[in-house]
Image: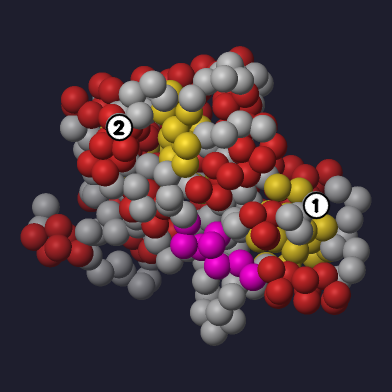
Amino acid sequence: MKEEWLNKGFVNEPVDKGIDLKSEINRLRKEKNAVILGHYYQSGEIQDIADFIGDSLALAQWAAKTDADIIVMCGVHFMGETAKILCPDKKVLVPDLNAGCSLADSCPADKFTEFVKSHPDHTVISYVNTTAAVKAVTDVVVTSTNAKQIVESFPENEKIIFGPDRNLGNYINSITGRNMLLWNGACHVHEQFSVEKIIELKKQYPDAAVLVHPECKGSVAKLADKVGSTAGLLKYAIASEKKDFIVATESGILHEMRKQCPEKNFIPAPPEDSTCACNECNFMRLNTLEKLYNTLKYEWPEIQVDENIAREAVKPIKKMLEISARLGL
């Protein structure tokens, strides 16, 4: 391993411009018995070459059952950690270690642990968008696909801490009638969507359905015809008779929506600041075909999780997978 790679956080080797990248990636994954998992927020070319694409729940479910020797997680760092925790004996690679998550960053493990200790009578529910160290002080992990159902699986009078996403927590409180104690974290992409600009778009497309991820602010969720996870929004769009959709989540999902429904019109909801591509996650966009190729070729960067942390963190992840399987999610 080169020092330059460590400094950069990815394999910084030149890729021969003359090679067919997609063919080479396919060759390497077959040779090495590797599986490429891609999140819906990845670029279209990464989604197209992945063996499986999905949201955080689906990727965790897929990682838990794969018989591949190598898992390449094309997403962000916590997704690689989750795969490694579920598959400690497999080699888990990510194309770029710099692909972090603003939501996970908004919940430092030491601060969250203090918060948990100061409320010892509370059950701790953590969103999957957290570090392994936060999961290690958690009772059950959730994703936006299963958060409502998992919260409702606890008695109504259960005292619950929910972290780190305050918007998702507020949304779950509003639809379940719970009063969970919320950590004050948020996703920098989902915080950016503009109520005013969505209303303007609705004037242009009066029959459009508004699709909103629950990490968005409550004022945006109030405009929604459907609030749901990326997988939930995709499913709704496929089943709907509507032709136009305004989509308030990371714009990578539009790739799969357009593939599944080529006859429909998907319009990305604009952020507050129209001068930036703020409806794109800059972390998700760090992964490229060149980095994916080098990751498979050199089998680096590899995700490692401290054994003590992993031993605790696997419990709430497995609990989530068990509850999801029981509920058919």
Q: Could you tell me which residue is drawn at 14 percent across and 63 percent down?
A: 7
In-image side of 168 versus 132 (left or right): right
What residue does disc 2 label? 118
Q: Residue at x 34, y 47 (%)?
A: 107
Q: Position of residue 44 (x, y in %)?
A: 56, 60
Viewer-proximal residue, 194 or 18? 194
**Quarter of the picture holding the C terminus:** top right
Secondary structure category for the residue under label 2: loop
Q: Is residue 109 shown above or below 147?
A: below
Across and down, in percent, residue 55 comes to: 55, 42
Q: Which x, y percent locates residue 327?
A: 64, 19
Residue 262, picture quadrant: bottom right
Secondary-structure class at tag 1: loop
Instruction: Tell me which amino acid carries mark 1.
Output: Asp
Q: Which residues are magenta?
A: 187-194
Give neighbour class at mark 1: few <14, some 14-19, many 20+ (Cα, 10 Å): some
Location of residue 147 by image quarter:
top right
Evaluate if marks 1 and 2 touch, with contact meaning CB atoms under 8 Å apart.
no
Mark identifier at residue 39: none
Front-lying residue, 119 or 208: 119
**What residue appears at the point 63 percent right and 44 percent down from the top-left corner?**
171
User: In this rendering, is residue 11 above or below 317?
Assistant: below
Q: Based on the displayed image, in which of its 4 quarters is residue 146 positioned? A: top right
Q: Is residue 253 visible?
A: no
Going from N to C along the chain, the mark reached first, 1 or 2, is 2
Q: Is residue 69 above or below residue 98?
A: above
Q: Is residue 314 left or right of residue 190?
A: left
Residue occupied by mark 1? 225
Reply yes or no: does residue 40 show up in magenta: no
Q: Residue 160 at what x, y percent from top left?
A: 48, 28
Residue type (three-letter) at the residue carrying disc 2: Ser
